[in-house]
């Protein structure tokens, strides 16, 4: 059994989803591990990770529209506004999504469905540099 780790840096464009599937696939393929489990962990409190459809971009827009309705920026119930009206909503969005994903690896490839992609979901309005820790365990 082998273990490998890698840090993936993602420069986002502000609120929305950035497809990181290709970078992750490349790293897993280069690892030489054929069968195992990949854990992804984003090291921030105002963004998250998501597996979502990668065929129709309207899906990503609809997810964001729903989140904007569910957790609006500048809601007066929030006290924490240290970095602006999108600060506390970003923390809540992270709390109701996920900061960690596990993806099986078989045949040296991610076991994702036909229409699945891996996304960094940025909850802040302005561009951010985010770090995702990849940990691959297998043989």
Image (cartoon, helix red, strand yellow):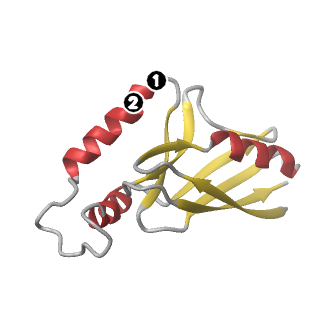
Q: Which of 52 and 14 is in front in this view?
A: 14
Identify the mark at residue 32; answer none if there is no mark: none
* Percent of width and height locating residue 1: 85, 62
Q: Nearer the viewer, residue 13 or 59?
A: 13
* Percent of width and height locating residue 108: 81, 41
Figure check: 87 above or below 48:
below
Label 2 sits on residue: 59
Q: Quadrant of residue 88?
A: bottom left
Q: In which quarter of the image is residue 123?
A: bottom left
Q: What element carries label 1?
A: loop
Q: Nearer the viewer, residue 40 or 1?
A: 40
Left or right relative to 132: residue 92: left
Q: Quadrant of the C terminus?
A: bottom right
Left or right relative to 74: residue 67: right
Residue visible at 43% across and 68% down in the picture: 45
Q: Are marks 1 and 2 in contact (CB under 8 Å)?
A: yes
* Percent of width and height locating residue 113: 59, 31
Identify the mark at residue 56; answer none if there is no mark: 1
Residue visible at 77% across and 43% down in the picture: 26
Left or right relative to 43: residue 6: right
* Percent of width and height locating residue 3: 80, 64
Q: How far apart are marks 1 and 2 (CA)?
A: 6 Å
The residue carrying pointer 2 sits among few (fewer than 14), some (14 to 19) or many (20 or more) residues within 10 Å by Cα, namely: few
């Amino acid at each position: 059994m082998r273990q490998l780790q890698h840090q993936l840096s993602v420069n986002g464009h502000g609120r929305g989803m950035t497809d990181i599937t290709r970078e992750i696939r490349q790293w897993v393929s280069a690892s030489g591990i054929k069968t195992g489990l990949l854990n992804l962990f984003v090291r921030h409190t105002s963004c998250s990770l998501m597996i979502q459809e990668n065929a129709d971009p309207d899906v990503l827009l609809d997810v964001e529209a729903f989140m904007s309705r569910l957790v609006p920026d500048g809601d007066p119930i929030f006290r924490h506004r240290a970095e602006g009206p999108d600060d506390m909503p970003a923390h809540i969005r992270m709390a109701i999504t996920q900061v960690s994903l596990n993806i099986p690896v078989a045949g040296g490839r991610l076991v994702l469905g036909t229409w699945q992609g891996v996304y960094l979901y940025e909850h802040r309005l302005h561009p951010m540099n985010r770090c995702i820790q990849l940990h691959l365990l297998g043989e």
